[in-house]
Amino acid sequence: MNKSATTINYEIRPCKFVERRMFLASLSRILGAVKQGKNYQYIGFGGCSFTDFKLFHRELQIDKMISIEGDDYSNSKLDYNKPFNCIDIRRGQSYEVLPKLDLSIPSIIWLDYDGVLRNYMFTDIETIFYTVPAGSIFILSCNRELKRGNYAELDDTYDSKKNTERNQPLTPKELKAVFNDLVPFKIDKDACSSEKSFDTIKTMLDKKINCVLKDRFQSKGDVLNFELLYNIKYQEKGGAKMYTYGGFIYNETTNLKSVYINDFDFITKNNNDPVYTIDVPVLTHKEALLLNQYMFNEEREKIIIEKKIVSEKDLINYKKIYKYCPSFHDVRF
């Protein structure tokens, strides 16, 4: 699930760090109002860093944790790197492991896929949304690029040796060839372009979740809805273009009416709100300290920009995420 963990230290990716901290800030309020964290379980992909597990165990007080591990790490390596004994490691791909888990418990599930959108991700959604109770939180992250070269099943439709063709976005016809009925009946010709791919993925996820909840009502009588909270995109410097989608599963008695989270600007207030972009500017430690000291003082900000210490764009982006921004230090030992 997390092949890039062998080449990327997940604990020092700034955009990912910011996103993780945003989740923590909002989840703390939700769990505090809906239920105590100890009653929840967390399901995710730990890799060898278990970063999310460490954070959610300490800050959200979640003791029941399941890490799905589908990569080639040895059991010894995973056990050695596991930070807490309460983490239950389950070997296998997500679509193999999820149906075997007890999903009747209120859950926070973050399927943080490294790769591009695939059909098995929708299978995972079906497994989860057909079973989890109200009060559960579902988050999915994936590479948002919908390019021909990412889908081997399309190799016969173009010259796979030509990188120029491999890097072209999927056409609506090609998208439907890969995802079939998951694709909306009418989509724009450029729906898979880098400017619109995240919206296309969101529309497909919306459709799948609504279908599963409708089927669940018809077969079980469960009246559940899904409220979108996270509609986020980002790209680490030189890294993959990522998209995150997530929200709250609720019913009449378990909902977010008593939880005030609208003061977080990264929270989606309406399903049609534009995507929220995380863009962490490259600043020196001294520049960040300077901005922290004089932020929201328009006169001081203007001086900083005029002196070209920090650009206006970097200032604007930093003001959006400074509360969640990492501070890395070289610690000699």
Image: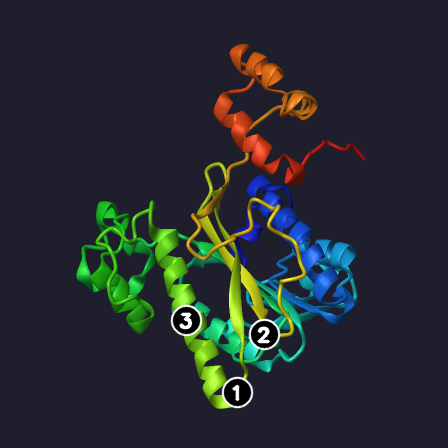
Point out residue 70 in the picture as x, y percentages from the top left corner.
Answer: 55, 67
The one of 155 and 141 positioned closer to us in this rendering: 141
Q: Which of marks 1 and 3 is nearer the N terminus?
A: 3
Which class describes the residues within 10 Å of circle 1: few (<14), some (14-19), or many (20+)?
A: few
- Residue 221 got which mark? 1
The structure's colour scheme is: rainbow
3 or 2: mark nearer the eye: 2
Which quadrant holds residue 64? bottom right
Residue type at the position of mark 1? Gly
Point out residue 58 in the picture as x, y percentages from the top left corner.
Answer: 78, 55
Point out residue 96 in the picture as x, y percentages from the top left corner.
Answer: 52, 77
Q: Name the residue under label 3.
A: 208
Residue type at the position of mark 3? Lys
Dot 1: what SS? loop
What is the CA distance from the residue labelled 3 to the residue labelled 2?
A: 18 Å
Q: Mark 2 points at which residue?
A: 251
Report if residue 1 is visible in the image. no
Point out residue 187 in the picture as x, y percentages from the top left corner.
Answer: 25, 59
Drawn side of residue 293 relative to residue 4, left or right:
right
Point out the image quarter for the C terminus.
top right
Dot 2: what SS? loop
